[in-house]
Every structure is written in C-alpha cells, then in structure tokens.
Image (cartoon, rainbow, N blue to C red):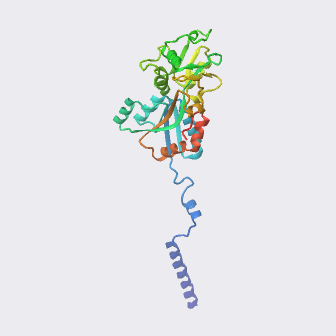
Amino acid sequence: MKQHKAAIAASALVFVLALMVLAGCPRSQSPGNAVSEVLPPQAGAEKGTIEQIGSTTVLPIATAWARAYRQVAPEVEVNVAGGGSGTGIEALINGTVDIANASRPMKDTERRAAEAAGVHPVEHVVAYDGLSAIVHPDNPIASLSLQQLSDIYSGEVSDWSELGVQGLGKIIVLGRDSSSGTYGSWEEMVVRVVDENREYTVEMLQLQSNEAVKSHVANTEAAIGYVGLGYLDDSVKAVPIVPSEGGEAVMPSKETVADGTYPISRELYMYTNGEPQGIVKDYLEWGMGEEGQKLVAEAGFVPVR
C-alpha cells in the first residue's frame, strides 16, 4: 500500500514538473498561423484621413482617385472638395488640408505667405489640360484665333457680327471667378497673349466652377466661355483655335494637348507641405502610377505617364 501511494506521488510530481517545463517554453508556430493568431486582419496598415481641397478643374481627377483608393486602402479616408485653386492653396498655408489642388502654379505672394507660416509647398504635376473655348451648339463660328479670343475677353470685340456671325448680337462673355486657377491661366495664355497689359473686360460674368460656365453656355446662344478639357461634352461646342503663329485651327483634345499642337495647354497640380509622408505619400504614388493615371485619362485629361 505504501509502495502504491509512493508511486502515485511520484507520478503526480512528474506531471507537475512537465507542466512547468511546458509553460516555460514558447509554443511552436508556423509562419502561416503565427500572424493570424497575434495580429488582426488590418494590422500594419496605416490608418487616417487625407483632406484635399482646391481647383474645380482638378476636382474630377481627385474625386475619381478618392473613390478608387477606397478599394486599394479601405483604412484611409480621402475627403475631396472644390472651391478654386486659391482656396486650396490658402488652406494648405493655413494647415487645414494635406493636399491643395491647383490648375496653376503657386504665385510668388502665396509662396512667401507659406514660408512665413512655416509651410514648404512641394509641387506635383498630376495631369495635363487644354483650356477650351466653348459656345452654344447652334453658334456657327468655325474657329477663333488667339488674337480674336483676346479681343473678346478684353472687350475690344463685343458683338458676334464683328466675327462674321450674324443674328446673335452682343457677345455674353463668361469666365471663372478670380480665385480660380483657370481664371489666371486664361488671363495669361489668352487675354494677355498679344498685350501683357490687357485685362479682362468688366462685362465678363464670373462663375464659380467649370460646370457653371458650361451650363450657362449650353443655355445661352450668344455666350462664350472656357472650361477644362475634362468638362467638354455634347451640351456645348468646343471652338478650334488658331495658334499665334498662324496655320490651321486646332481642336482641343487629349491628343492635341499631348502632342503640343493645341495652343492653350497647361499642367495640373497637387501641392503638399514638404515631401509627402505616410498615407499622403502612398496616395500620391498610387495616383501617379498606372491605375491613377488611367483615371486621369478617363476623366478627360492627359496623363503624365
């Protein structure tokens, strides 16, 4: 009996010692199940929100990027809004956005204001655009030269009859508001193309978006306006433009912007404070990659790739 009890005690002692040894040893894990047991499915993915504001010309690109990027990085939220290039750049200077969309380069005054605020803008060219003169579909005008466009937008020409178009009367001149990068680009490339001292006519009706300009032209037979390439559709008529050096009129298109033959072309930008880091860096690299640049083309603009 004593021997039996001694055997039981010895067996129990061995069992306890075995448990202690096992508790002190790490479990063996295969590479496949170690991560799934310790980390959640999204572990290692950086989360956050990207605020992006500015140019209404860049808006279709930014909106398409934000929508598609949800599938690429669902843990990152990209908020996009318009308001104009000046609005976006001001927000970047104020530190309220991560990315400022702009359809023009930053002005020297804006760069000085940024530096004074401790902001160091870095420019990213994300697409190319062709600014397009548009008229009502029933307007019979076949083409316009840069000189004629400058005359219209400076007020030197004010009636369609002066351009050989009868029955439409006074030209209703439409453009963008002064906070828009498109306003500045058109002023530089069209209004002042023959005289750097020319200004927009005071009779120009300033509108707050490309869409507003297009809609107004589509409903006003005597109107002329300008929009970014991505806003062209059948509701308006794009007017071919004769370059300053003469020759044949060139229709605005992705092809003529890409080959340099369309005379009113420009770069489109996104600005960051310093070189982008973290989720902003990942987002912009994706946008400049194959998938993002495909969306640029689908939005009606010219990819940089």
| Residue 137 appearing in the image | yes
Residue in the foreground of this view, choosing between 30 and 236:
236
Residue in the foreground of this view, choosing between 271 and 226:
226
In the picture, residue 129 is in which quadrant?
A: top right
In the picture, residue 293 is in which quadrant?
A: top right
Which corner quadrant holds the N terminus? bottom right
| Residue 204 appearing in the image | no
Q: Residue furthest left?
A: 116
Residue in the foreground of this view, choosing between 8 and 202:
202
Residue displayed at 52% across by 15% down? 152
Which corner quadrant holds the C terminus? top right
Q: Is residue 176 above or below residue 305?
A: above
Residue in the foreground of this view, choosing between 258 and 295:
258
In the picture, residue 294 is in which quadrant?
A: top right
Residue displayed at 60% across by 45% down? 71
Q: Position of residue 171 (x, y in %)?
A: 56, 12
Q: Position of residue 161 (x, y in %)?
A: 58, 9
Q: Position of residue 235 (x, y in %)?
A: 64, 22
87 left or right, relative to 170 = left
The number of callouts visible is 0
Q: Position of residue 53 (x, y in %)?
A: 49, 33
Q: Is residue 127 above or below residue 201?
A: below
Q: Is residue 19 above or below residue 280?
A: below
